[in-house]
Image (spheres, rainbow, N blue to C red):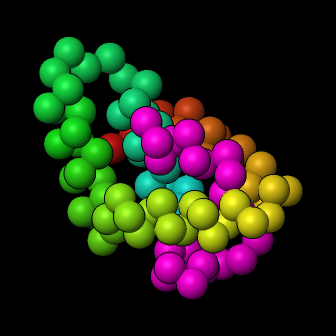
C-alpha cells in the first residue's frame, strides 16, 4: 500500500501541513489504513472499500493524504516520530474502527 509505505516519510512537529491535514488526522488515518492493510481480507474489493470509507470519514482523498505525506517528509526526524505514532495507534486495539 503506497500510503502506508509513505508514512515513514512523514513529519509530526507541525500541527498542520499546507495540505490542511493535521498531524493528528494524518496519524489516525494512517493507523486505520495500516490496520486494514495488516488484516487478512480475502476480498480485495472489500479492502479497497474499507480504505475508501476511512478516507471519506476523515474528509480526505488519496491525493490529499499523499500530498500531506510528501510535505511532512521534508523533515526526516519528524517523519520518524510520526511513523512511531502511527504504529502505536495501529497497535492500540481499543481504537480499532
Position of residue 6 relative to residue 67, above or below, is above
Quick one: 94 or 53, which is closer to the camera? Answer: 53
Quick one: 66 or 56, which is closer to the camera? Answer: 66
Residue sticking out furthest to the right:
77
* Residue 15 located within the stretch drawn in magenta: yes
Magenta stretch prevailing secondary structure: loop
Count of numbered tags: 0
Quarter of the N terminus within the rendering: top left
Q: Residue at 55% across / 74% down in the picture?
A: 22
Quarter of the C terminus within the rendering: top left
Taking 37 as reference, is 57 left or right?
Answer: left
Q: Is there any visible trace of residue 24 in the rendered image? A: no
Q: Is there any visible trace of residue 27 in the rendered image? A: yes
Position of residue 11 relative to residue 47, above or below, is below
Q: Residue at 24% across / 33% down in the picture?
A: 47
Q: Residue at 42% across / 45% down in the picture?
A: 32
Position of residue 91 relative to residue 57, above or below, is above
Q: Position of residue 66 (x, y in %)?
A: 48, 60
* Residue 17 located within the stretch drawn in magenta: yes
Quick one: 87 or 44, which is closer to the camera? Answer: 44
**Residue 27 falls in image quadrant:** bottom right
Taking 82 as reference, is 58 left or right?
Answer: left
Quick one: 22 or 65, which is closer to the camera? Answer: 65
Q: Residue at 16% across / 21% down in the picture?
A: 43
Q: Position of residue 57 (x, y in %)?
A: 26, 63
Q: Position of residue 62 (x, y in %)?
A: 35, 59
What's the magenta region?
1-23
Amino acid at each position: 500500500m503506497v500510503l502506508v509505505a509513505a508514512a515513514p516519510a512523514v513529519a509530526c512537529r507541525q500541527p498542520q501541513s499546507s495540505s490542511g491535514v493535521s498531524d493528528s488526522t494524518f496519524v489516525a488515518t494512517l493507523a486505520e489504513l495500516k490496520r486494514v492493510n495488516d488484516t487478512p481480507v480475502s476480498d480485495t474489493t472489500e479492502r479497497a472499500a474499507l480504505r475508501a470509507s476511512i478516507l471519506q470519514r476523515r474528509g480526505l482523498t488519496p491525493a490529499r493524504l499523499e500530498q500531506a505525506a510528501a510535505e511532512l517528509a521534508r523533515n526526516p526526524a519528524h517523519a520518524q516520530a510520526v511513523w512511531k505514532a502511527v504504529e502505536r495507534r495501529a497497535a492500540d486495539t481499543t481504537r480499532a474502527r
